[in-house]
Amino acid sequence: MFTLQISQGTFHLSATRNLILPDLTIQAGESWAFVGANASGKSSLARALVGDLAVAKGMMNSSFSHPIRLSLEQLQKLVSEEWQRNNTDMLSPDENDTGRTTAEIIQDEVRDEARCRQLAEAFGITSLLDRRFKYLSTGETRKTLLCQALMAQPDLLVLDEPFDGLDVGSRASLAQVLAQLHQQGLTLVLVLNRFDDIPDFVDRVGVLAECELTHIGPRKTILAEALVAQLAHSESLQGMALPEADDASAKAALPREMPLIVLRDGVVSYDDRPILNHLSWTVKPGEHWQIVGPNGAGKSTLLSLVTGDHPQGYSNDLTLFGRRRGSGETIWDIKQHIGYVSSSLHLDYRVSSSVRNVILSGYFDSIGIYQAVSDRQRKLAEQWLQLLGLNAAADTPFHSLSWGQQRLVLIARALVKHPALLILDEPLQGLDAINRQLVRRFVDVLIGEGATQLLFVSHHAEDAPQAITHRLTFVPDGDSYRYLQEAL
């Protein structure tokens, strides 16, 4: 029987940080979930379990012969590499299409078309096998990477945040597939931020805090202890206040009675395939919308129309902040009213920058700092850093932070302007429960000031802030979608 044993294990992460795993044994066929806050060492634990992080002190023995680890960072790298093909000389002169298909990605290391199709069918992505990987949605790319890993038939599969970015149906489908793999004897380890993401089949749980494995044991016992700790911490968030805006008098005033968004019979299509299919939608004063729907439904496409980034915005009857699209407005005339966070923004923020400068860039709607920063802006940025608990990391590189910490900094970047419209596209992805509650508190306090309206996209219904007044739902309808709009 395969076994992984760690006793008094110390793993060096940096000159000042170590991962401490006092006593851990994983038997073949077991299912584990390890849960912890941002920067608690979860991703380092995942690396240690598959042998990618060497033990510095103590003992680690593993008889697993083919362990595989999957993470959000690996997915981000793969997507970035596929898009980078457009910007290199890797292509032959006559090569027009610049990306691999889903089937090619799945079979990147193991060529077996029958198994590829079998796995794709199990994950519900058979129809995507011939589509270019770089055009898939976040959830679809996640499933593709999982299929790729299973092609190699691992004996230990470690999944770092497998459910982040997946809609409710996709999460349930993935959990069902993982349960079947567990029943077939595959040893599974899930590394999670959310306690409520632990699938029913998982029977053992570990908790990480400040890079130390503090608790391991039966699922029920550990979850009870963790929930008590979460509840106690949430009480300290009461009475939190946001830093002020930079200069409220300099903000462009919008008439109180004017809708922020008016889209009439909106259509967006690619290669005659409708992405948005005759959507009429108005965001009236005082309304705060939650936008929900499956992966690939077109939610992010709709948001890109609102931010002015989508070229088909000019071909639609679209009015933003009182100005008809294409009437001579600049992209900055639109963006001055918007604070925005999305997975694509996170992917785009690859410049070398300190944590402080990422927050400051929110005042200029830029990726990086390219103009003078005022003393007041610097002072306000310090207040944001203190509020996030990142003041000690102000001058460290943004990309040295954990995935969840990076997302939290980007959310602060979107909030610094106290914008007229706050657009949050999966803003809580990668955040632990405490930071998710902190962000929701940010949003509710800002909305409570009465000057900001909200568009909120999340696959987790419970993530929506209390301020939400309306919901736009993308409902599957044959090969396209219809739209349900309701007041809450």
Image (cartoon, rainbow, N blue to C red):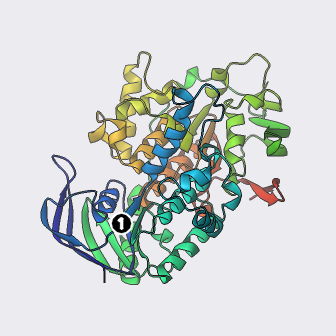
Q: Position of residue 119 (x, y in %)?
A: 59, 67
Q: Quick check: 105 above or below 179?
A: above
Q: Nearer the viewer, residue 2 or 256?
A: 2
Q: Nearer the viewer, residue 255 or 143?
A: 143
**Residue located at (81% from left, 36% from top):** 262
Residue 321, visible in the rendered structure: no
Q: Quick check: 373 above or below 310?
A: above
Q: Position of residue 97 (x, y in %)?
A: 65, 35
Residue type indicated by callout 1: Pro
Determine whether, in the image, residue 231 is placed left or right of residue 448: left
Instruction: Give the quarter of the image for residue 127.
Output: bottom right
**Residue located at (36% from left, 32% from top):** 356
Q: Position of residue 337 (x, y in %)?
A: 63, 29
Q: Residue beneath label 1, please?
A: 67
Determine whether, in the image, residue 273 is placed left or right of residue 353: right
Determine whether, in the image, residue 338 is placed left or right of residue 469: left
Q: Quadrant of the C terminus?
A: bottom right
